[in-house]
Image (tube, rainbow, N blue to C red):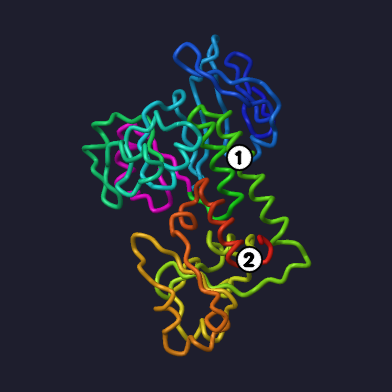
């Protein structure tokens, strides 16, 4: 047995190494892995341990590590997947694995096809419904109800956690999802498009000649994105300075006094199922009229789903944030 780039190799059961995995296609009821060099893709995935193939090329074992640093081994490419997070549902459909999804959580509403899947609950899961779907894998986000999932794992149903905090980590998880579900070509194509869009934005917003305004993003009244959070990374890439970047938690509740004293140049609030805030409501908060963003009428709304769900649409969120923070760059 050999090891190359962290992926185990044997001669009896072809184990595809990290530098040679590329295309996945159906073959004899299973999948085979092509051998085009694509080191960038595998490095992006960063979690693949090994893939074993039988004599005719079917995947008979797949070992992979999730974002909780949990390593699971699957007896082939999963064909019946339950997704317990809107984010993971969006990722699975985006890489072409929608037909393998048999159940989703109650909040999975995108793409439209997800609405046709069996609902399994959310923060409180319906274990009976999940078992009835006979899944070979559960995929979930970082709000996973572990107390529910661990008993399912004991019954032979493994779970895989996607939990990212940056744009780079989103790209990694999309690559992982492509490998995990046998849709490598689709995920590669998706990543190529996302990277091109990200580069097109950051070439403008991160240029050294561009000024970086102070930004306050509110996803719920007086709740914002702190250091290490997804929103913090988005604000930075969009060419802003997060006023809450030095707070003590990822998602802090701040005070009016904090926002007023920070004097943001731009205020952005999210709109979604849990928020019905308006620009007028924010501008009329006591003392906020002295904030530069309010005085300059630089207060905007954005769809919560494209900045809180860390799937492919997060790039939509980056693009919109960049245009709101730097309208002068996109005229």
Of pointers 2 and 1, the one earlier in the residue sequence: 1
Residue 288 against residue 18 in the figure, above or below: below
x and y, in percent, of residue 130 in the image: 27, 37
x and y, in percent, of residue 211 in the image: 72, 71
Residue 217 in view in this figure: yes
Residue beneath disc 1: 191
Query: Where does the magenta region start and end?
Result: 140-162
x and y, in percent, of residue 132 in the image: 23, 31
Q: Is residue 76 left or right of residue 53?
A: left
Residue beneath disc 2: 327
Q: Residues within 10 Å of mark 2 (few under 14, many from 20)?
A: few
Q: Is residue 105 magenta?
A: no
| Quarter residue 128 falls in | top left
x and y, in percent, of residue 86 in the image: 39, 47
* SS assignment at label 1: helix
Residue under the point 57% across and 78% down: 264
Residue 64 against residue 205 in the figure, above or below: above
Q: Is residue 264 left or right of residue 106?
A: right
Q: Residues within 10 Å of mark 1 (few under 14, many from 20)?
A: many
The circle on residue 150 is none
Q: Is residue 264 left or right of residue 5?
A: left
């Amino acid at each position: 047995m050999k090891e190359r780039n962290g992926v185990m190799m044997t001669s009896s059961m072809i184990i595809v190494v990290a530098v040679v995995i590329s295309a996945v296609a159906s073959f004899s009821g299973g999948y085979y892995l092509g051998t085009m060099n694509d080191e960038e893709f595998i490095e992006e995935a960063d979690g693949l341990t090994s893939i074993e193939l039988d004599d005719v090329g079917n995947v008979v074992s797949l070992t992979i590590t999730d974002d909780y640093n949990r390593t699971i081994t699957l007896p082939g490419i999963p064909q019946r997947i339950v997704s317990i997070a809107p984010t993971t549902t969006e990722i699975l459909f985006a890489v072409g694995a929608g037909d393998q999804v048999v159940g989703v959580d109650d909040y999975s509403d995108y793409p439209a096809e997800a609405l046709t899947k069996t609902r399994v609950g959310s923060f409180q899961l319906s274990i009976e419904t999940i078992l009835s779907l006979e899944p070979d894998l559960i995929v979930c986000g970082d709000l996973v109800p572990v107390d529910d999932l661990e008993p399912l794992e004991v019954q032979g149903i493994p779970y895989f956690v996607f939990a990212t905090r940056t744009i780079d980590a989103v790209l990694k998880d999309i690559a992982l999802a492509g490998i995990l579900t046998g849709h490598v070509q689709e995920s590669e194509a998706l990543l190529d498009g996302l990277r091109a869009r990200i580069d097109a934005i950051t070439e403008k917003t991160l240029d050294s000649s561009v000024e970086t305004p102070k930004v306050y993003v509110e996803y719920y009244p007086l709740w914002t994105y702190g250091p290490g959070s997804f929103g913090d990374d988005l604000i930075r890439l969009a060419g802003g300075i997060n006023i809450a970047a030095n707070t003590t938690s990822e998602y802090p509740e701040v005070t009016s006094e904090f926002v007023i004293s920070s004097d943001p140049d731009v205020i952005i609030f999210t709109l979604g199922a849990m928020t019905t805030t308006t620009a007028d409501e924010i501008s009329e908060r006591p003392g906020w009229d002295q904030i530069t963003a309010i005085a300059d009428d630089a207060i905007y709304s954005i769809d919560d789903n494209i900045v809180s769900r860390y799937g492919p649409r997060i790039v939509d969120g980056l693009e919109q944030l960049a245009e709101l923070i730097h309208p002068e760059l996109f005229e």
